[in-house]
Image (tube, grey):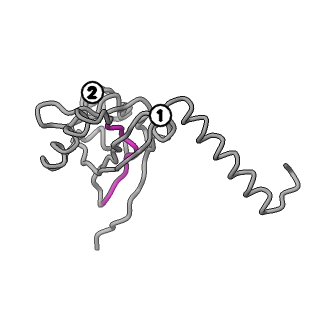
């Protein structure tokens, strides 16, 4: 029986801080064996990664997958561009949105579904500094409301 549960390995929390995420898409990752083993150990970093489209193919850049310890000669460059697997229609749609409306494609998380490594990418617009301050103020207000609802004495 196949297991359909998602096992999230890494998330890009900085993306939600720096961008408004309009839509999300799922893409497969074209990886080598030692890279998959390294991801299973949780040794992947999405912090400063982004995606670009070149000649009808989509690539993830800046996604750091640490070399697998037992991989010896089979290890690849940790920062090499990784090709993403998506339908051609989706890639063309994203390409059009990026060119016309100034969106960016940002990797949001890496996870496994039925043993296959997947990357959730977000179609994002950049936040200005005042947007970030506004979000921080809303979070602080919600935290205070939750605290007062619980009746915490440690305020």
Residue 80: image tag: 2
- In this view of the protein, which residue sits in the foreground, 52 or 81? 52
User: What span is in magenta?
Assistant: 104-113
Circle 1 residue: 127
Work out whether residue 44 or residue 11 is closer to the camera in this orientation and state it. Answer: 11
What's the residue at 36%, 40% (across, down)? 107
Tell me if 119 is positioned left or right of 55 in this view. Answer: right
Which residue sits at x=41%, y=45%? 21
Question: Which quadrant would residue 51 be assigned to in this image?
Answer: top left
For the residue carrying disc 2, how many other residues have a C-alpha within 10 Å: few (<14), some (14-19), or many (20+)? some
Residue 93 x %, y %? 19, 45
Determine the residue positioned at 47% across, 34% down. Answer: 127
* Residue 154 is inside the magenta segment: no
**Residue 100 drawn at (x, y percent):** 23, 34
Q: Earlier in the sequence, mark 2 or mark 1?
A: 2
Report helix, strand or loop for mark 2. Answer: loop
Q: Secondary structure at mark 1?
A: loop
Residue found at the far right of this picture: 153
The image position of residue 113, as x and y in percent, is: 32, 58
- Vertically, is 56 above or below 153? above
Crowding around mark 1 (Cα neighbors within 10 Å: few <14, some 14 to 19, many 20+) is some
Q: CA distance from mark 2 to mark 1?
A: 28 Å
The front one of 107 and 131 is 131
Residue 72 placement: quadrant: top left
């Amino acid at each position: 029986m196949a297991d359909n549960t998602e096992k999230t390995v890494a998330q890009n929390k900085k993306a939600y801080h720096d961008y408004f995420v309009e839509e999300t898409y799922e893409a497969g990752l074209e990886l080598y064996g030692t890279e998959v083993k390294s991801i299973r150990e949780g040794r992947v970093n999405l912090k400063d990664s982004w995606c670009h489209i070149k000649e009808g193919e989509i690539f993830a850049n800046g996604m750091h997958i640490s070399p697998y310890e037992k991989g010896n000669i089979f290890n690849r460059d940790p920062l090499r561009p990784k090709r993403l697997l998506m339908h051609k229609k989706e890639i063309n749609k994203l390409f059009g949105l990026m060119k016309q409306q100034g969106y960016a494609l940002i990797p949001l998380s890496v996870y496994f579904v039925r043993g296959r490594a997947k990357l959730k990418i977000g179609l994002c617009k950049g936040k200005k500094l005042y947007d970030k301050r506004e979000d921080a103020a809303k979070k602080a207000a919600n935290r205070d409301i939750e605290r007062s609802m619980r009746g915490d004495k440690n305020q």
